[in-house]
Image (cartoon, helix red, strand yellow):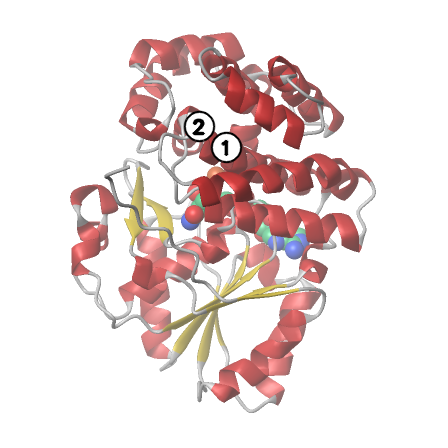
Amino acid sequence: MKQTYTFNFPTPIRFGAGVVDELADYLKGHKLKRPLFVTDANVADLDFFEGIKKQVEQAGMHVAVFSDMHKNPIKSDIIKGGEAYHAAQCDCVVGIGGGVALDVARAIALRVNHKRDLFDYDDLIGGDQYVTEEVPHFITVPTTAGTGSEVGRSAIISEDETKRKRILFSPKLMARIVFADPMLTMGLPPFITAATGMDALTHNMEAYLSKGYHPMCDGIALEGMALIAKSLEKAVNEPDLGSRSDMLLASLMGAVAFQKGLGVVHSLAHPLSSLLDTHHGLANAVNLPYGMKFNYGGFEGRFDHMGMALGLGVNNGDQVVAYLFELNRKLGLPIKLSEIGVKQKHIEELSVLAEADFCHPNNPKPVKRADFKALYQEAL
Ligand SMILES: NC(=O)c1ccc[n+]([C@@H]2O[C@H](COP(=O)([O-])OP(=O)(O)OC[C@H]3O[C@@H](n4cnc5c(N)ncnc54)[C@H](O)[C@@H]3O)[C@@H](O)[C@H]2O)c1
Ligand SMILES: [Fe+2]
């Protein structure tokens, strides 16, 4: 083995019911006085958000809130957020919410001291070379269990006009600490629980199959799948603290694992969000069984391991695809693209966008435009 590798698992994570109550003390301990809370407009209205804000204010800090963002966030959201940070003379950024809020918070943390055009920092054009240490103290508090963006080092932000997704990336954009409190996810509605949970499952499966060499991520991904197989249905249909905790962990684990890479399913899903504003997790959920069917041949051994993790028994990798269709059905999610507004006329454009996406180069099998077309067609 002559090649060398870099394995990263550095984010400190406080995990468990009630850990968010430690935020005020943490800020104080780091002499931070003026946090910018970044969240979306929905979460800003939830009781727990008001509760966190009050706790921090009662500890003597001034909290500014920025919540003006699109469902699939765009560059101008980030510019506005940067302005809000300066206007309120903030000294740190606390992202509280789902993947959208956390990605926006991370991009704002980049923006405040990095004044080049935002997309100069695009990873695909080597933008991380411009990211300096001048990133304000950045903290994440996830409130969905799906993207794992809380432990990520990237933010997916779209161009205002074209809606093309761009990926801002730098290890310097990692949170300094994560407060992962499953209590915050207790009130997630069933549909969001299901869709975000399927995003987490997709991360774990695609990371496990992806081309990179990373046995540590592989182990994490398999355990992430096992937690989801055990708890996603329960979290959707009769949630309790145990199932919510499992899902929050599995989501974190998926994101830790996908530093190894993702694959064809995320490349199928991203254009649906760009073009039709489909929720990211939902787009993955529908495409996951088809993408896994595409990947099966030649990777039977890997599927056997995934089947074991999913509780299908020994050497039953060939049942993974059927399991995924059935899981979507049990969670009340669609299994056809036509059920989420995709029409025949969209397939050409979706396929062009999917081919240009940044995820599939890590898929275990090469994926060509004709493959994307065939996959969309099959799922229609
Ligand atoms: N940076 C990364 O590594 C990474 C990885 C995957 C996905 N993403 C991005 O994450 C985004 C999707 O994130 P998401 O799936 O978490 O969706 P989301 O952030 O849009 O949240 C889904 C919905 O749930 C609501 N919500 C959040 N927390 C809630 C709570 N506790 N109770 C009730 N409602 C709540 C939100 O207001 C929103 O309406 C996409 O923009 C995607 O590109 C980022
Ligand atoms: Fe995802």
Amino acid carrying mark 1 in the image: Thr
Dot 1 lies on which element?
A: loop
Residue 71 pos. (x, y %): 48, 45
Q: Residue furthest bottom?
A: 60
Tag 1 residue? 278
- Under mark 2, the amino acid is Leu
Label 2 element class: helix
106 to the left or right of 204: left
- Which residue sits at x=50%, y=32%? 278
Q: Determine the residue positioned at 45% across, 40% down.
A: 215
Q: Is mark 1 within 8 Å of ligand 1?
A: no
In the picture, measured across the screen, residue 295 lies left or right of residue 306, that is left
Q: Quadrant of residue 106?
A: bottom left
Query: What is the C-alpha distance between the residues marked 1 and 2?
Result: 6 Å
Upstream in sequence: badge 1 or badge 2: 2
Depth order, front residue of 59/78: 59
Query: What is the x, y in percent for residue 328?
Result: 67, 25
Q: What crowding class fits label 2: few (fewer than 14 Cα within 10 Å), some (14-19), or many (20 or more)? A: many
Q: Residues within 10 Å of mark 1 (few under 14, many from 20)?
A: many
In the image, is residue 61 above or below residue 38? below
Q: Indicate which disc residue 272 carries.
A: 2
Tag 1 and tag 2, C-beta contact below 8 Å:
yes
Instruction: Tell me which residue sits at (52%, 16%) in the image.
Output: 300
